[in-house]
């Protein structure tokens, strides 16, 4: 069930606050699911390498003070030994530092993989991606957050990981060493200096986080504009829209650049603070060292010994200050991490919230494609009804204006339904409700048939093609080829491509002939399994895309095919032929269209020839309405009303109950804004259409038959 309308935009300004830490911890739970996870083990390895590296750095830092000793004492053997030791330590330090960076890079890749896959699981669960992109506007550019923001977050975090995890150990050790050298005054001075720097940089980082979030949003908008031009290059070219789109794209670029300038202005003060504390820290180290010297603590030492001691103490104090200044230097990186944390955390919270709602049937229903089923899985338990609507009211999610009121409808096997009407009368909206993409504002919508093979399949207005081979386009969205494999399934695919008019061949499935004017798509793609580097939307014409959609429909062979103007780019002859093939394959059609030819869809084999033309009957729903707004009258012909037009072929049982010449129709009462529905009934008896053999039908992918409610039973408002 779709979310009703867009959620309000979040007004909270992103900043370094409790919400940031909560979101950061939630992300860490994804990166480190358990102590024995791969990421946890790599992080532990990084900690060990970083600690070993710090130990080597400490030994290297003491070498200058030792040089003062051997040079002051003119000790040649000591000089040679010290030089050899220094070279070994430097080589070891270089190797450890390189391994440190290598481990950080591995963590970056692993973090990005886990976090992206986690968001993918939530994003592609049911129809969450549809709700987030179409029905809500509180989360901008979810694609950018998943792809770009996650990448930058993981890269920035991995670059500071080793510095952050080793900082507590180095601070404790060098604080102790500094206390031994200078007394309590040295560590207190350094800690006070660090606290001051932290407070100042925290104040400078606050505005940067919010501005960074705004910049990333504008980056996504700018990138989306270019993607929009790429996808719609041909329509824009027909409109000669280059100049207009140039101005619009530049306008988005200017907004982005203006935000970047504002961000740089705020970062300037942060850079000033960071650099100032860096250089003041070097002076502070000498101030701390001078305290015991001028107080006479080392008055008994010789100049050589004093130089050695000063060099050692200087290294300890300067490295302690360096540890603090490195943390301060990380302010710019941490501000970026904070911005990405808010964007990723906000998306994660929204996805988790939608997932929780899905458990109540608001986003997911139980009639999902189960792509993991074993080929040949049996169909659901037998049912003759696909959809049952009772007093349904429909409005657009972002509007309270009713499109359809008080609609009761039953769609059963053999009842091919045609929905026509003026633009904006709710034709596609009705299909969205049937498909569970939208919620009905009132009434009950039940889908008693699964999606997929042996069930219901939707063909939307705009054909959808994924990246992949021609075979993958035909069998989409199935992950495996079934029920047959190899040449047997290849033959089925080639036959259905031929029937759709996309392949010229001498192999025939029925007595139907493909269009001789259409070139072979298999030849253009150089085979069913040849990877192509093009965009299918750029290569195929609108008619070819619709033909390929029908080839997919024939391959999947659902019991019910719901088509939303799926033949608008095809001729009436091709349209009639495709419908006839679908009916011969045992499909019941629910179609949206404007053409009069759709009202004369060919009758399947077994119908009396003289009964191919249809007459009409308005289905009254569960109970006949009372006199008043919606009345009843007996008559001949078709009842015309405002709104949508629905034509249906009914079972012979209904005909026998009403009589072959008896027609019922609705009439519009006092409320002229009420949108009525018109249905047509084919009088006469029909034989059951030919069922395809088990070898022709794809295997079962769905679970057992279930009834899914998309809306609760409430009265129309």
Image (cartoon, rainbow, N blue to C red):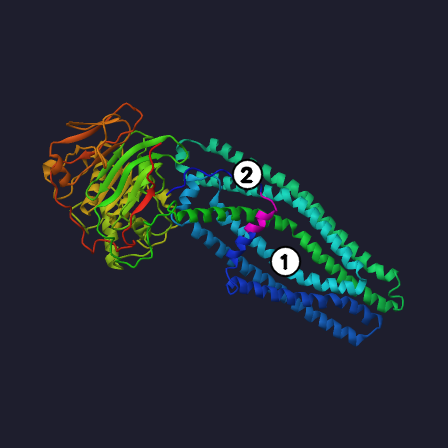
| Image quadrant occupied by the C terminus | top left
How crowded pointer 2 is (Cα within 10 Å; few <14, some 14-19, many 20+) is rated as few
| Residue 705 percent across, percent down from the top left | 27, 51
Question: Could you say which disc has been placed on residue 164 in the image?
Answer: 1
Residue 342 visible to the viewer: yes
| Frontmost residue, 531 versus 428 | 428
The secondary structure type at the circle numbered 1 is: helix
Q: State the extent of the magenta-drawn residues as a range.
A: 14-23
Picture layout, residue 359 above or below residue 487: above
| Residue 343 percent across, percent down from the top left | 53, 46
Name the residue tied to disc 2: 11
| Residue 341 percent across, percent down from the top left | 55, 49
**Quarter holding residue 319:** bottom right
Q: Main secondary structure of the magenta part?
A: helix
| Frontmost residue, 545 versus 435 | 435
Picture layout, residue 642 above or below residue 149: above
């Amino acid at each position: 069930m779709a979310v009703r309308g867009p959620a309000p935009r979040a007004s909270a300004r992103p900043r370094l606050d409790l919400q940031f830490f909560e979101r950061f911890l939630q992300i860490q739970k994804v990166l480190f699911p358990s102590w024995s996870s791969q990421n946890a083990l790599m992080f532990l390895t990084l900690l060990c390498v970083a600690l070993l590296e710090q130990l080597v750095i400490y030994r290297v830092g003491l070498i200058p003070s030792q040089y003062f000793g051997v040079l002051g004492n003119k000790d040649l053997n000591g000089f040679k030994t010290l030089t050899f030791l220094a070279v070994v330590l430097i080589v070891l330090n270089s190797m450890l530092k390189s391994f440190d960076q290598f481990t950080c890079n591995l963590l970056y890749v692993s973090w990005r993989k886990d976090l992206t896959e986690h968001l993918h699981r939530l994003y592609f669960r049911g129809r969450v991606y549809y709700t987030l992109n179409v029905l809500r506007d509180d989360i901008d550019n979810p694609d950018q957050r998943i792809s770009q923001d996650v990448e930058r977050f993981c890269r920035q975090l991995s670059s500071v990981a080793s510095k952050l995890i080793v900082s507590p150990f180095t601070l404790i050790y060098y604080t102790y060493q500094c206390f031994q050298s200078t007394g309590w005054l040295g560590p207190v001075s350094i800690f006070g200096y660090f606290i001051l720097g932290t407070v100042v940089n925290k104040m400078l980082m606050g505005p940067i986080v919010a501005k960074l979030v705004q910049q990333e949003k504008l980056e996504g908008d700018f990138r989306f504009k270019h993607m929009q031009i790429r996808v719609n290059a041909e329509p824009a070219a027909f409109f000669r829209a280059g100049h207009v789109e140039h101005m619009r794209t530049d306008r988005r670029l200017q907004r982005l650049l203006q935000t970047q300038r504002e961000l740089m202005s705020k970062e300037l003060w942060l850079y000033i603070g960071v650099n100032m504390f860096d250089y003041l820290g070097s002076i502070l180290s000498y101030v701390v060292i001078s305290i015991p010297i001028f107080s006479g603590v080392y008055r008994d030492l010789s100049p050589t010994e004093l130089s050695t001691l000063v060099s050692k103490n200087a290294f300890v104090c300067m490295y302690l200050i360096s540890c603090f200044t490195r943390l301060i230097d990380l302010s710019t990186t941490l501000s970026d991490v904070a911005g990405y944390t808010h964007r990723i955390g906000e998306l994660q919270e929204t996805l988790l919230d939608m997932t929780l709602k899905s458990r109540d049937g608001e986003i997911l229903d139980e009639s999902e494609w189960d792509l993991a089923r074993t080929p040949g899985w049996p169909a659901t338990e037998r049912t003759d009804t696909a959809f049952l609507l009772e007093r349904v009211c429909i409005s657009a999610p972002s509007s309270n204006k009713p499109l359809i009121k008080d609609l009761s409808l039953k769609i059963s096997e053999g009842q091919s339904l045609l929905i026509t009407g003026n633009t904006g009368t709710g034709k596609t909206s009705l299909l969205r409700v049937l498909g569970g993409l939208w919620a009905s504002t009132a009434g009950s919508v039940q889908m008693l048939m699964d999606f997929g093979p042996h069930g219901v399949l939707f063909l939307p207005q705009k054909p959808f093609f994924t990246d992949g081979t021609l075979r993958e386009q035909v069998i989409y969205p199935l992950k495996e080829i079934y029920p047959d494999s190899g040449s047997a399934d290849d033959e089925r695919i080639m036959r259905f491509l031929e029937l759709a008019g996309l392949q010229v061949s001498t192999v025939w499935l029925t007595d139907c002939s493909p269009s001789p004017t259409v070139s072979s798509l298999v030849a253009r793609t150089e085979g069913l399994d040849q990877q192509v580097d093009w965009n299918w939307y750029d290569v195929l014409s609108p008619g070819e895309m619709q033909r390929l959609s029908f080839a997919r429909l024939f391959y999947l062979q659902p019991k019910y095919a719901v088509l939303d103007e799926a033949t608008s780019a095809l001729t009436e002859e091709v349209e009639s032929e495709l419908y006839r093939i679908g009916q011969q394959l045992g499909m019941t059609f629910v179609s949206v269209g404007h053409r009069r030819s759709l009202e004369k869809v060919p009758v399947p084999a077994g119908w009396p020839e003289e009964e191919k033309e249809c007459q009409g009957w308005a289905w009254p729903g569960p109970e006949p309405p009372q006199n008043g707004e919606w009345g009843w009258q007996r008559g001949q012909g078709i009842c015309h009303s405002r709104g949508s037009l629905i034509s249906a072929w009914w079972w012979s049982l209904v005909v026998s109950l009403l009589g072959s010449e008896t027609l019922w129709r609705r009439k519009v009462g006092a409320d002229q804004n009420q949108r009525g529905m018109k249905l047509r009934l084919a009088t006469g008896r029909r034989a059951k259409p030919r069922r395809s053999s088990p070898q022709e039908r794809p295997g079962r992918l769905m679970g057992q038959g279930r009834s899914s409610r998309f809306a609760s039973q409430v009265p129309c408002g």
